[in-house]
Image (cartoon, coloured by chain):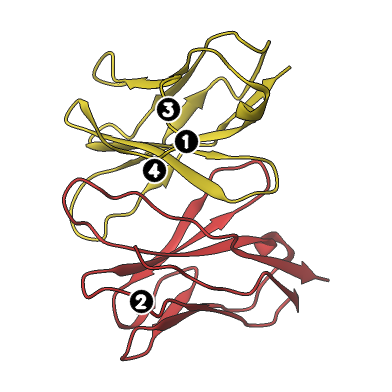
Chain colours: A yellow, B red
Amino acid sequence: EPEVTQTPSHQVTQMGQEVILRCVPISNHLYFYWYRQILGQKVEFLVSFYNNEISEKSEIFDDQFSVERPDGSNFTLKIRSTKLEDSAMYFCASTLAGGGDTQYFGPGTRLTVL
Amino acid sequence: LAKTTQPISMDSYEGQEVNITCSHNNIATNDYITWYQQFPSQGPRFIIQGYKTKVTNEVASLFIPADRKSSTLSLPRVSLSDTAVYYCLVGNNAGNNRKLIWGLGTSLAVNP
C-alpha cells in the first residue's frame, strides 16, 4: 500500500537555526498538508498546498514558516528561525481529491529545539 | 467547520465491543464524518468515513443517525493493540480547503 514518508524521523536543532522537514506524499496525490502536534496536545493544522501554491494557512503558520514542492515528489516545510515552542511532532499528509477525501499521514518528524 | 465533542477517555477489556460516540451538532449538509486512530509518536491513521446511516469495513463500523448530529464508532472485539487515541472529525471537500480540525480525541485503554 502506498504511504507518505517523512525525513528525518527526529531533528534536534538550536534555537534560531533553520530546519527543513521533508515529506514524500503518495505519488498521485494532489493536495498536501502540514500539521503539528505538541506533546500531549491536539493535532493542529498548519498549511494546505495545492497546484503549487498555498491554499490555506493557520495563524500558527507565520512568516518563519514556508512550504515548497521543489520537484515532483518532495514537499518541504522550512522553519527559518526556530523557537523553543516549535518543538513538536510535524506530520505531513496528502490526499488525492474528490468528495470527503481521506488524508493519509506520514509517520512524523519529531523536532526538538534546544 | 463543525466542532466535535467526544469523551476524553474510555476503558475496555480485550474481546469487548467498544463504542465511541461523537457529537457534531453543527454539521453542515456536505460534511463527511471521519475517524482516525493515533498511536503515541505516530501519525494519525484513517479508520473509517461516512456520510449517513451505517458504514462498515474490516476494522470498524460507523453509525450515523438520520439527523447526523452525532456518530458512533464501533470497534468489535478490541485487543490490546487497539489502545490508542481516536479522533472524530467533520469536514467537507469545498474548494481546495480540506484542512482537518482536530479535537483532543478519545483515549481508549484496552486492558487484559
Q: Residues within 10 Å of mark 3 (few under 14, many from 20)?
A: few
Q: Are marks 2 and 3 on the same chain?
A: no
A18 vs B75, nearest the viewer:
A18
Q: Is residue A75 visible?
A: no
Q: Residues within 10 Å of mark 2 (few under 14, many from 20)?
A: some
Q: Are marks 1 and 3 in contact (CB under 8 Å)?
A: yes
Q: Position of residue A16 (x, y in %)?
A: 61, 10
The residue identified by callout 1 is A60
Q: Residue at x 81, y 71 (%)?
A: B111
Q: Label 2 to label 3, Cα distance in Å?
A: 29 Å
Q: Point out the frontmost of discs 4 and 1.
A: 1
Quadrant of image for the C terminus of chain B: bottom right
Q: Label 1 to label 2, Cα distance in Å?
A: 25 Å
The residue identified by callout 4 is A1
Q: Point out the frontmost of discs 2 and 3.
A: 3
Q: Which mark is residue B26?
A: 2
Mark 2 residue type: Asn
Disc 1 element = loop
Q: Position of residue B19 (x, y in %)?
A: 58, 81
A103 vs B96, nearest the viewer:
B96
Q: Residue at x 57, y 73 (%)?
A: B6
Q: Earlier in the sequence, mark 3 or mark 4?
A: 4
Q: Chain for mark 3? A: A
Mark 1 residue type: Ile
Q: Position of residue A2 (x, y in %)?
A: 37, 39
Disc 2 element = loop
The residue identified by callout 3 is A62
Q: Earlier in the sequence, mark 4 or mark 1?
A: 4
Q: Are marks 4 and 1 in contact (CB under 8 Å)?
A: no
Mark 3 residue type: Asp
